[in-house]
Image: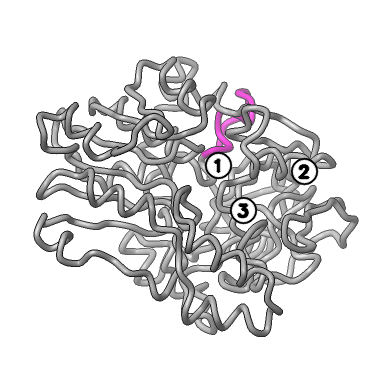
Amino acid sequence: MRAVTWQGKRKVQVDTVPDPVIEKPTDAVIEVTTTNICGSDLHLYEVLGAFMDAGDILGHEPMGIVREVGRAVTNLKPGDRVVIPFQIACGHCCMCRHGLPTQCDTTRVREQDTGAALFGYSKLYGQVPGGQAQYLRVPQAHYTHIKVPDGPPDSRFVYLSDVLPTAMQAVDYAALPDGGSVTVLGLGPIGDMAARIATHQGARVIGVDLVPERLGRLARRGTETIDLREASDLGEVIRDRTDGRGTDAVIDAVGMEAHGSVGAKAVQQLSSLLPDAVAGPLISKAGIDRLAALYSAIDIVRRGGTISIIGVYGGKLDPLPMFTLFDKQIALRMGQANVKPRIDRLMPLLTDDDPLGVDTFATHELPLEQASHGYEIFQEKRDGAVKILLKP
């Protein structure tokens, strides 16, 4: 089959690799019909190469048709149309029963001391072959799937793999009061969709970014926006709009590669050039993130408010202004999205009325063979790239 493989910093290519097969009774194999490039894939493309091997298959946002199931998978059959969540989970362990499949005890990557295994996401999360491919082996398939109906296009459902539940968790964790307000930092796919969900729930949303195309997407939907390039003091601008207090919550949808963190960027870039044997332990034990977005969130949120962190962070030595967090009584919620527990709330929104705009959410649809071009324009924020679908 053809698959998108990691080959080095800022280098991916489409290769011919062996087709996946059933390895365990709890496996299934699907034929992928649509798969996406995620913003977190760019962390592998840019700064986390120390945890990758050449030839690793990327991608964790696929959907398709079941072609084969293991003997222990009794709730799927060949021909079923499914979306595959980005996390691999059993559905019956203590963590899964508590609504935390990202912490699944069955698939947790203990040798790295990390959470549940993820598709296509490095040694940190199990080095499981990913979904940017013609076929995908799905471990723990009895739970790691979402059945969707035939009929509507893939674009209606494919975001159930990551974007929709991740954005909904970001809003859930923001703990907005009725009619409350939220600033969304970063209007890539997750920040954009979080803003749409919060608006749909009746919140006042202020979206912040510095890419005109991203700001324009939400402005056309009636959302307040701030162009970061024109705001010398973002906190003051937002306080001026909120009676001097700041918003009830802030969603940080930027994460570890925030614009404006010059020193941390230099350290990240240096570590990405070191040999893997040096860089891996260095990042694991002494890595730092670019924290400009998080520092902004701490400044922006009102006293007693909540910061919901959904952008990916990976540092172990990040400095935080603990006095300010304590003095302002700021609540922090964060973590990988727990997909399956939110599906029942999301499915009613995926109708022909399309209140969240999922049918037109993608900015680009490319053949799988053009994945390298897709990564390039997404990473460089060129050609209006916000969300890219790949078609095997």
Q: Is residue 154 magenta?
A: yes
Which circle's residue, 1 or 3, is located before the other in the chain?
A: 3
Q: Which residue is mark 3?
A: 41
The amino acid sitting under disc 2 is Ala
The amino acid sitting under disc 1 is Lys
Q: Could you tell me residue 164's position as x and y percent?
A: 45, 39
The numbered mark at residue 371 is 2
Name the residue located 71 percent from the left edge and 47 percent from the top edge: 78
Residue 148 visible at all: yes
Whole-angstrom CA distance, mark 2 to mark 3, is 12 Å
Element class at badge 1: strand
Is residue 101 left or right of 359 when viewed as pictured?
left
Name the residue located 29 percent from the left edge and 39 percent from the top edge: 233
Q: Is residue 119 above or below residue 163?
A: below
Q: Could you tell me residue 301's position as x and y percent?
A: 20, 45
Name the residue located 23 percent from the left edge and 26 percent from the top edge: 204
Q: Which residue is mark 1?
A: 147
Whole-angstrom CA distance, mark 1 to mark 3, is 25 Å
Which circle's residue, 1 or 2, is located before the other in the chain?
A: 1
Q: Is residue 288 above or below residue 39?
A: below
Q: Which residues are magenta?
A: 148-159
Instruction: Please identify the quarter of the rendering in which residue 103 is found.
Output: bottom left
Mark 3, Cα crowd under 10 Å, few <14 / some 14-19 / many 20+, is some
